[in-house]
Amino acid sequence: MKTPMFVWFLVGVLFVLHFLLHVGFGFGTGAPDLLTIALLLAAREIGLGRAALLGLCFGLLEDALSVLAFGANTIAMTVTAVGGAYTRDLFVGDSRFFLASYLLIGKWLRDLFHWLAVGEGLRQPFVDQVLIQGAVGAVYAAAIGLALAAVAGLGREA
Amino acid sequence: MPAYGNEPESDGRRSDVTFAVVVMVLAASTSFLAESNQQRISSALQTTILRPFIATQARLNESRFRAVQVDALTTELDSLSAIVSTHSALLDENQTLRGLLGLSDRVSQSYLPATVLRPGTPGSESMFLVDVGADDGVSHGSAVVSAHGLVGVISEVRAVNAVGMDWSHPSFRASAMLADGSTFGLVEARRGRFREEDRLVLNGVAFNQSIANGVTVLTSGLGDFLPRGIPIGRIEGLADSEGSWRKSYWMTPMVEPGAATHVLVLTGEGGDDVSAVWPADSLATSDTVGVGPGS
């Protein structure tokens, strides 16, 4: 049931939930990065150009709440979206295992790109930010993605 | 027979790739925009798409605070009513006497109560929003304080709200002095290996000065923004000494930024002395880290 309308609906729901949990309820890092999950799911469905544009918009929204390094989220999200869209040409996987791996790597790379884009003066140590927090966030995103796939009927179980 | 090769790119695919490249260039250029333009974009997004989410946090914080504070506020209101009823006579008397002596009205800081909102998104770790803005008299550089001391400063002001940075922000600086006024320096944030290890440092202390642990550090009032006398932290040991001319000291902050949910924004002139708001005897007995204004 993966029609374009359904994908946009899913992206919309994840977008609202992300900002509701992070900004509205103030859960901070305790809440999963649903915006990146939404972006990665959409990127494989909507094509390269539109995925990049969606990444730019999502990144700008996150940067609107940042005073540390405006633009870092925009760059990270746009590059992640382009990468996600490009995987469509490389992999045709539709299994839940592929989905989990795709979200795990995508989220981890998004954190890596953000760390690189933040700039030397402001970035946290690589081990803390990318290896530890990034890995935990990536596993969290993959787990949420799998739960989402089960609920929304994305991917094959095999 | 022609050899097999890659499928030629269609026009649609080529234009898609070109569009993606243009978007990526646009994304990369956002970092190089002038700060005023970046703030304009942030402001536009915060007041449109993100507004419902920011308003939700404000509502939640308010109701949480109200639910917890009702009993305490009722008690405080009762005590204040008793004090105010006798205070008005003193105020009248004071005004009359000042009038007789030809003294002008006492200059005082205005304190605006505000709710702190934290976005909780990547890159927003050391920033917060307060629900008071230029319409309420808040200006760039206004001090944000809690019952225990300095939380941060306002870095961007809009009509109805403002963006502040707490002391853990790498750009945070405060001109400071010891409580007895014997030593002056500059307080700045020093990043730790983890965010939880971020600390304050009193920098630029003369090499021949020695400061004992536990001494309170206050804002000195030098510069245009922070008034004199706001507690920042306590000395916690020597951080480093450079050559034989400068020392810096670690400090334990008076306020843990993450714990601050309700604050006061100072809107008066930067040069005023507000040390009377935080009497030395109460500072000596108060706990430091981990206490928020709500406590």
Image: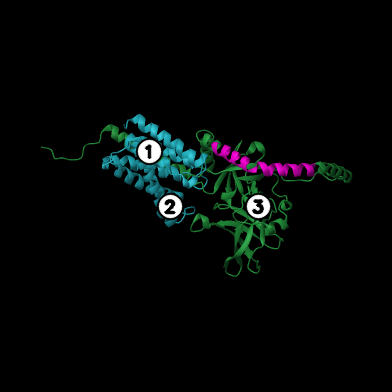
Chain colours: A cyan, B green
Q: Nearer the viewer, residue A82 or B72?
A: B72
Q: Is residue A81 left or right of residue B4?
A: right
Q: Which residue is mark 3?
A: B149
Q: Of the residues shown, which amino acid type is indicated by label 3?
A: Gly
- Picture quarter containing residue A94? top left
Q: Which residue is mark 1?
A: A52
Q: Of the residues shown, which amino acid type is indicated by label 1?
A: Ala
First of labels 2, 1 by sequence position? 1
Q: Of the residues shown, which amino acid type is indicated by label 2?
A: Gln
Q: Chain of mark 3?
A: B
Quadrant containing the N terminus of chain B is: top left
Give the Cα distance between marks 2 and 1.
25 Å
Question: Could you say which disc has been placed on residue B150 in the image?
Answer: none
Q: Nearer the viewer, residue B259 or B188?
A: B259
Query: Residue at the front extreme?
Result: B71
Q: Nearer the viewer, residue B118 or B138?
A: B118
The boundaries of the magenta stretch are: B56-84
Instruction: Name the spot of residue A121 as percent of width and height, x first.
Output: 49, 54
Above or below, A104 relative to B249: above
Q: Main secondary structure of the magenta part?
A: helix
Q: Is residue A27 left or right of residue A93?
A: right
Q: How many marks?
A: 3
Q: Which residue is mark 2?
A: A133
Q: Residue at x 45, y 46 (%)?
A: A72
Label 1 crowding class (10 Å Cα cut-off): few <14, some 14-19, many 20+?
Answer: many
Instruction: Name the spot of residue A30 as percent of width and height, x first.
Output: 47, 47
Q: Nearer the viewer, mark 1 or mark 3?
A: 3
- Look at the image and tell me whether residue B122 can be seen: no
- Specify whether disc 3 shares its chain with disc 2: no
Give the Cα distance between marks 1 and 3.
45 Å
Query: Residue at the top extreme?
Result: A5
Q: Is residue B141 left or right of residue B98?
A: left
